[in-house]
Structures are given as C-alpha cells and as structure tokens.
Image (cartoon, rainbow, N blue to C red):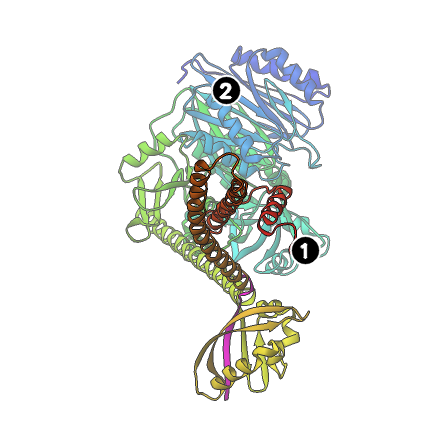
Amino acid sequence: MSSDLRVGLGYSTRGDSYGAGVAAASEAVKTSGFPMLTFLFTTDSYDQEAVWEGVKKIVKNSKLVGFCAGGVIVGDSVIRQGVGVLTISGQELRVATSLRGELEKDPFGVGCQVGEDLLASNIRKGTVFIFPDAFVTDVSEALRGLYSTMGAKFKYIGGGAGDNLRFFQTFQFTEAGIESRALAAALIDGMAVRTAIGHGWKPEGEPLIVTKARGKKVFEIDGKPAFEAYSNRLRGIPKGQFAEYGMRHPLGFPDIWANYLIRDPIAVNPDKSIDFVTEVPKDAVGYVMSSDPAELVETAGRVAAKALHGIRPQFLLTFDCISRYLLMAETFKEELRAIKWAAGAEVPTLGVLTFGEIGSFGDVPLFHNKTVAVVAAGSDAKAADECWWPDVTNLESAELSVLYEISSINFDDPKVALNDLIKEAFRRAVRFFGLPYYAVFIGPEGNRQLVTSWGFRTADELRRHMDEHGPKQFRFPLGKKGEVGLLFIEKGSPLEERERRLYTIFARQLEKALLRRKETEERQRIQRLLHEIQTQHRAIVEQPLVGSYILIEDGILHVNEALARMFGYQPEELIGKTDPLEGIHPDDRSMVAAQLQRRLAGISEYAHYTFRGLRKDGSVIHCEAFGRKIQVGDKTAIAGVVLNISDRKTLEEQLRKSQKIEVLGQMAASVAHDYANFMTTIMSNIEVAMRKLDENAAVRKYLETAFKTCVSAAELSRKLLLFGRQGSQSSMKRRPLDLKRVINEVAELMNSLLGKNIF
C-alpha cells in the first residue's frame, strides 16, 4: 500500500463551465499535489466538454474517470448544479482507465472490452470503479461482461450516470475524452479499499411472481396485467398517483441471506405494463417493498460503518440513488450526516446522486436501485473480518422465495439453445447465492465440455481451482455417476451447511432439468425418425412404382395413385367401378375373371399371373399381378399389387429377336463353311485341268468361266461366314455400310449365277 497517499477534494458551483472545472480541480490538487487519479462528477447544467477541459488543464496527465449525475454530494450537502473533483496521489498507486461507447448495441461485449482494456495494464488486483450510462438498456449485462472478463479477484463499485430527471442524455469521462451512451471505468491498486451497499427497504405482504417481462418492462405479475396486480397489492392506486406510490413501494427480489435487489417502477403504459428504471429479473419471485425515512437513514449509517470497518480512511466516495433523495426530501441530509459521522468530520467525502448503484452484498457485484453504496479508502487497513449484518427476520421467507424460483428452472423450451438456458439459470444462481465462481460441464467424465463459467479469467485458472479441494468448494456430479455433467461452485470463504444444502437443491433441479431436456431431445429424435419412416411409408404406399388394389364382389374398393397412373386414370375415377375387367384386354378377360372368381370363391387364396391391360387412351400395357384373399368386415375381398412389365416384355422380345438372328447366323456360317470347302475342291480341279490343256484348246474358255464362277461363289461363302460371325450377340458391332458396293456385288453375283436370259 502507498504510505504517502494524499487526497484532495474540491468543488465549484460557478455557472461558467470551464471556470467551474478549473476551480474544483485547483482546490483539490492543493492538498493532493499532482494526482495519479482524478474523480470528476458534474451535473447536466454544464457544457460537459468545457468542464472536462478545465479540469484537464489542472490535473494534466492524470488518469481521470467520472460522469454526469443528478447531483453532487459534498459532505452532508447536495449540489444540484456543480462540479466535484477528488484527486489521489501516491508513489505506489497504479491506475488504468477505459472508455467505450455504443453501450446500447452490445452491453455484454462492451463490458468485456472495458475489462480487456483494464487488464492490459497488467494490474491483477485492486478496485474497479464502474460508471455506465444508466439510460441504456441492460446495464446488468455490461456488468456481467466486465466481471466475466476480469474475474473475482477485484472489488467492483460504482453508479449509473444520469441527469436532472429529464432522462435525455448523460455523459461519461476518462482522460481520453467524453462519451455518451458509454461505459467508463477505472482500476486502481496500491491503496486499501473497502466497499459496502444497502438500502433499508423491507418486504410486505405475500410474494409475487413476475410472469412476463422483457428488459425494463414488466407485462404481467402473477399472470395478470402488471399494473393491476401491483395496484391490488397496495389496495388500489388513485389515478395520477402512480409515481408517488412507485417511489414509496419498489419491488424487491431476495437472495438466500434476505438481501433484496431493488427495482424501481417509474411509469405505467396504456397496456397496463410497468416500466422500471432497471431490468427486472425474468420469472423472479419478489415482494412489494416499503420503508420509512428513519430506517433509510439508519441503513446508510450502517453501510458506511461496514465500508469503514477495519480501515483507516483517507477519503469516502458515496453513490446514493437519486430516488432516495427525492423520496426523503429534507431527511436526506440526515442520511448524509449519518455517513459523514461514521467516517469522521476530517475525512474528505464526495458523492453523487446516481441512477442505479453497483456493488455487492457479498462477493459478486449487481446493479441496484434505491440503494446507497459507500467506498472507504486509505493507505492501510487493519486486520479485521468483514462486517456484515444479515436480515435474519426475513431469512425464512427469502429462502422460500429462492426455493420457488429454483423449482421453476427448466430447459423445456426447444426454441432456445440448451447452453443459453443453462446460462440464464446461472444468472439466477448469482443473484440467489452471490457466487463468485462457478462452472458447468456437460457430458460424462472423460468427455466433458465446459458450457458456462463465471469468475475465471482463463481456462488455466479454472483448472487450477478445480485441482484444489477445500471447504470453500462444492462439487455435484449431474446424473448417475456424473454421466450428464458436473457442477462446480466456489466461494471466497468456507461454505456453511445451509449454503451446501441450498446448493444441493439447486444442483438437483439443474440435473432434473438437464435429464428432462435430454429425454425431450431423445423423444424428438425418435419422433423425427418415425416421421421419416412414415414419410417413406407414405411414399411407398401412396406413390410407389407398384400399383395396389382391393376388389370386392361389388367392384373396386381401393386403388392407389400408382395403379391409377399406370392405367392413365385418377384414383377417384376407378374407385367404385363395378366392373374391374374393363381395364383388361378382351383376349385376357376370361382368364383374369377366372383368377378373380377362384379367390372370391375360396378355391385359391393366392394368385400370380400376367395379363394385358387397356389404358384410358386405349393403348396396351403388359402387367403382372399378385393377389390374395382377405376379409374386409364381413365381405370377402382380393388385395394385391400390379406391376407394369411392358418394358420387360419389350426387352424380352428384343432378346428373342437377337437370339433368332444369332441362330440364323450360326446356320449361315455352317453352310458357308461347307460351301467354301466344295468350291475349294472344284477350283483346285479346274486349275489342274487348265494346266494340262493347251492354251488354244476349245474347252479352256469354259473352264476359265467355271473358275470365275467358283471365285464368285467363294466370295459369297466368305460373306455368309462373316454374317454368321456378326450374328453372334458378342460380336455384333455397328459400322458404316457402303450400300452401293453391296448392291453391285450382289448384281454381279446374280448375273454370273443366272445368266442374261432367265426365261
């Protein structure tokens, strides 16, 4: 810790924006010297950029963080138009800041970015001051993003920026500049810091359930329009007085220690929904809250005492809800005096009227309404336990409310991914239990996948924590022998028996929800499979390649679409016809009629035959039928299927022709072979005779003519032999044919065989 810690406080109510910034900063640095960190709080009546420039002129390169608020608190006074500056210096101080805009577009992502910015400083412990634009939807999500990135080793404290209740625009600052709709944050290490938060509101009446909500809007409470249910709890709200009733009776949602997360209603809509200052927990069990000024003042003093417990303070920062200021009016000064009295008159105290407060009842920061948060800081702290006062008077009702919420956890919505449902369940768990660390794994041991975790910056950090075993940890195998997964929880202090009992109840509900989801998904898988089978079955039955029919003595009882399409009809054109033989070729009707009669008479149960059918257009198709006798009620019927075998018949005919050609070719080849042998013998003898004759012998020319005829006959036999070979299926090939050449050869052959005169 920095032993030379020095703190300066200054404020100004000047109307000149730049001058007010210069004056407040100048007053502060008189005591602190050149600061390492400057807190800047303003009201919306100023030119914020001019104020920032005035302060920067004085603090120069100091890190700076701050925001515009509904008022500045100095000591026990509220300044509705003013600038407050607190400066801190010390050689051992280490500071980092971040300012990120477009908070409304991606609250979680912006929170993560700010966390990464702060961690880039390599500061690994300390206190994070968080100042979001409170007019942006889902500040809680930005806080979750920041915590998820930075982890549980830091303290978190802060408040929401606002204006003088115009709800128009507000601003956040760091030394880097000014933004609107942004998140500003500072991380500081090197000084002792303690924080505390509280409100003083008490539950009244029976619990209620927020049955429908989205963001800051609640549509239904206990299944009724939100305003109707809320008004009934307060025995009716006179017209035009909702704002007053809402200010005095916020809603509160308990954790297991009866710490209530307050949500402030601000407006009623025509549809009887209610708008709140901050997001309302979905499906939460809560209460209508009430309080009195004395209780609020006492609580503020206790919060300050808790923050100061064990520390030698050198300054106090207070983030007090503007709604408390408006409600308490003049009594609010007593609240500020209670805080100041706890700190001591000599301790510099600066604060702001905030639109939502950030702090933790235990280990985890949440975004609160109608609450006061106090930061006490100094150069060192005494060794002391945390001072905490649980509300034991409401412990039982708070626990019952939490148990009801736990029992309602389910993962049944098939439209939402399982991982998202698990994350939503653990957002509740953080609110119920204040868990700084948790992790959920899905799958059996050896094949587990991390679904969600909280408080661990890295996977290595999670692994190190799980490798340890101690009284701060809770492990619960989900499912039989952990086949569904594992739940891991760790707190900053040893777990009490009551905590372990409640964690076990939560774990069993989580297990039940996971098993139910698993069963649902398996059932849906089977249903999808059955649907596929049914679809395939319908495709087979309703639109198959095979036609099906049912005949009774009175006619056609049923045909499917395939059979109707086979004969060129629609099913309704055939069903009810009294003469099923109309679609049979006349030459086959007697045979088919006999087949049908044999089955209807019980002579033959099964039948298989072929027939020719007549299509609607008169064309003929070849069919193959299979049928059997069945009973339809008290009537004997024939059920069967019909195949269109026309293509098969065509192929069979082509095969028969091919076989005939092959046989003819084989015969031609045999004749050609024998004929060629005869011609060879004759030609040989003619050649011998011609060699023995004189060249001038009269018979020689007759032998030459006979020889030429034999040559032509031999050529014919060669062609017959070639035809025989081509007649074989295996050797048949398509090739070009010179038709003129073939005709000339045939003519020449015929002339030589027949001569010129055939009559």
> First in sequence: mark 2 or mark 1?
2
Classify 585 as above or below 243.
Answer: below
Report which quarter residue 379 is drawn in.
top left
Q: Position of residue 16 (x, y in %)?
A: 73, 18
Q: Main secondary structure of the magenta part?
A: strand
Residue drawn 38% across the image and 24% down it: 381
Q: Residues within 10 Å of mark 1 (few under 14, many from 20)?
A: some
Q: CA distance from mark 2 to mark 1?
A: 45 Å
Q: Position of residue 502 (x, y in %)?
A: 36, 51
Q: Which residue is denoted by mark 2 in the rendering?
A: 96
Q: Is residue 347 visible?
A: no
Classify 56 as above or below 145.
Answer: above
- Report the disc number at residue 144: none
Quarter the N terminus occupies: top left
Q: For residue 635: magenta? A: yes
The magenta segment: 634-647
The foreground one among 629 and 174 is 629
Residue flagged by tag 2: what amino acid is it?
Ala
Q: For residue 674: magenta? A: no
